[in-house]
């Protein structure tokens, strides 16, 4: 039998994998400012991950992706 493939063996799965993989809340912040920064960080990681997937599929990205 072949080796069992672990989730960490996937080249697209890293620190910036989309939150669909882990939909539960992993941390709790007591500050609304920290919560905003954490949300922006997670969204930025998801955008980076998505750009990598598109690049691997050969889809050119002509414009910057804006995060509001």
Image: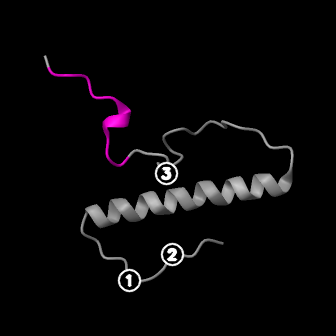
Where is residue 1? Give x, y as percent: 13, 16
Where is residue 67? Give x, y as percent: 60, 71
Asked if disc 3 and disc 1 are in contact, CB closer than 8 Å, the reply is no
> What is the crowding at mark 3: few (fewer than 14 residues within 10 Å), some, or many (at least 20)?
some
The first of marks 3 and 2 along the sequence is 3
Distance, label 3 to label 1, CA atoms, is 22 Å
Residue position marked by numbered label 1 in the rendering: 62
The local secondary structure at tag 1 comes to loop
> What is the crowding at mark 2: few (fewer than 14 residues within 10 Å), some, or many (at least 20)?
few
Distance, label 1 to label 2, CA atoms, is 9 Å
Residue position marked by numbered label 3 in the rendering: 16
Q: Quadrant of residue 55?
A: bottom left
Query: Does 4 sit above or below residue 46?
Result: above
- Please state which of the two labelled residues, at mark 3 or mark 2, is closer to the viewer: 3
- Which SS does the magenta portion mostly show? loop
Left or right of residue 24: residue 8 = left
Pick out the residue farthest to the bottom.
Answer: 62
Left or right of residue 44: residue 40 = right
Residue beneath the point at 38% across and 83% down: 62
Query: Does 27 sit above or below residue 31?
Result: above
Residue beneath the point at 34% across and 59% down: 53
The local secondary structure at tag 2 comes to loop
Residue beneath the point at 33% across and 65% down: 54
Placement of the C terminus among the 4 image quadrants: bottom right
Q: Which residues are magenta?
A: 2-12
Left or right of residue 40: residue 28 = right
The local secondary structure at tag 3 comes to loop
Where is residue 56? Give x, y as percent: 27, 61
Where is residue 33? Give x, y as percent: 82, 57
Residue position marked by numbered label 2 in the rendering: 65
> What is the crowding at mark 1: few (fewer than 14 residues within 10 Å), some, or many (at least 20)?
few
Marker count (numbered): 3
């Amino acid at each position: 039998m072949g080796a069992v493939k672990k989730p960490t063996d996937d080249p697209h799965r890293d620190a910036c994998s989309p939150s669909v993989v882990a939909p539960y809340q992993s941390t709790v912040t007591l500050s609304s400012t920290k919560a905003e920064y954490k949300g922006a960080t997670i969204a930025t990681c998801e955008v980076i991950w998505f750009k990598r997937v598109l690049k691997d599929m050969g889809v050119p990205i002509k414009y910057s992706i804006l995060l509001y």
